Amino acid sequence: MPIRAKICGIRSEEDVRVAVEAGADAIGFISGVTHFSEDALDGDRAAELAARTPPSVTKVLVTHLADASSIVQLADHIGVDAIQVHGLVTEDTVRRVRASARGRKVLRAVHVTGPAAIDSALRAASICDGIVLDSRTGDRLGGTGRTHDWSISARIVRALDGSGCSVILAGGLHPGNVAEAIAAVAPHGIDVNSGVESPTGDKDARACAAFVAAAQRISGPRGS
C-alpha cells in the first residue's frame, strides 16, 4: 500500500482545501504550544478547520502540552481522530493520554539529534501507536525545515520492524528530497510542514500535490 502522507501546520480554510485536493491522508493542527510555531492555532480556530475537513482525511492534533488531561480535553474540543504528542513529555504522560484517548491513535515525537534517539524510539514504541521522527532546534520542536541523520531513522525503522508501531518520518522534507528520504529510511508515513509552504507561510498547492504524489508512487514496505 502507498506510504501515508500527512501535511501539518494547517491554519486556514485554504490550507485545508489545498491539502485535501493534493490527496493528503492526514492533516495536522498545531495547538497548545510551548515552543515557537508560526502555525499554532487556538482550540476554537482548530475546531473550525477540523469541522471543514472531509471524514476521509485523518485529523491530527499536534501539541506540546505536557498534562495528559489537558491534551485529551483539547483533542475532544477540536474533534480530531489522532493525537500527536510532540512536546518534551514523560513516558507516563503518553501512557495516560493513550489510556484516555477514547479510541484515537496516539503518536509520540522522537527528536533525532543523535544515536540516543534509537533507545528513545524503542521505549516510545511500547506505549503508543506510532512515532514521528523529527528534527528540532533550541527554540523549535518541529517545523524546523532541517533534515536529521536519516541513517539513524533507518536503524529505528529496522529495530521496530514487526512491533506494530508505525514510524513516520518528518523534519526538513519537501518535494525535492522526499523520494530520497523514503528510499533511505523506508518509513510507514511521511510528514511535512514548511517544506510545502509558499513565502507567505500558506500551503502551496503544487508543492503539496508533488509531495503526496511521491508517497503514492512508492509502495510502503510493510503495508501500513
Image (cartoon, rainbow, N blue to C red):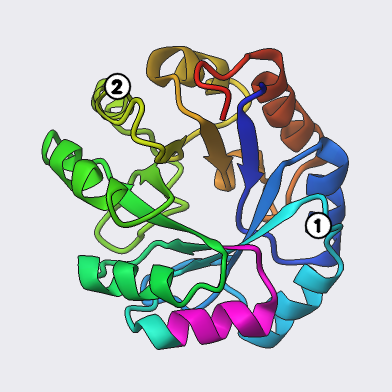
Is residue 143 shown above or below 76? above
For marks 1 and 2, the one nearer the N-term is: 1
Tag shown at residue 162: none
Across and down, in percent, residue 149 comes to: 27, 27
Please, what secondary structure does the residue beneath circle 1 have? helix
32 or 67, nearer to the observer: 67
- Quadrant of the snapshot with the C terminus: top right
194 or 107, nearer to the observer: 107
Q: Residue at x 46, y 27 (%)?
A: 187
Across and down, in percent, residue 55 comes to: 83, 58
Q: Residue at x 58, y 31 (%)?
A: 174
Residue type beneath disc 1: Val
Q: Main secondary structure of the magenta part?
A: helix
Of circles 1 and 2, the one toward us is 2
Q: Label 1 neighbourhood size at 10 Å, few (<14), some (14-19), many (20+)?
A: many
Residue range corresponding to the magenta coloring: 70-82
Please, what secondary structure does the residue beneath circle 2 have? helix
Within the image, what quadrant is residue 210 found in? top right
Mark 2, residue position? 158
Relative to 134, 176 lies left or right: right
Residue type beneath disc 2: Arg
Is residue 131 shown above or below 30? above
Camera sees residue 90: no
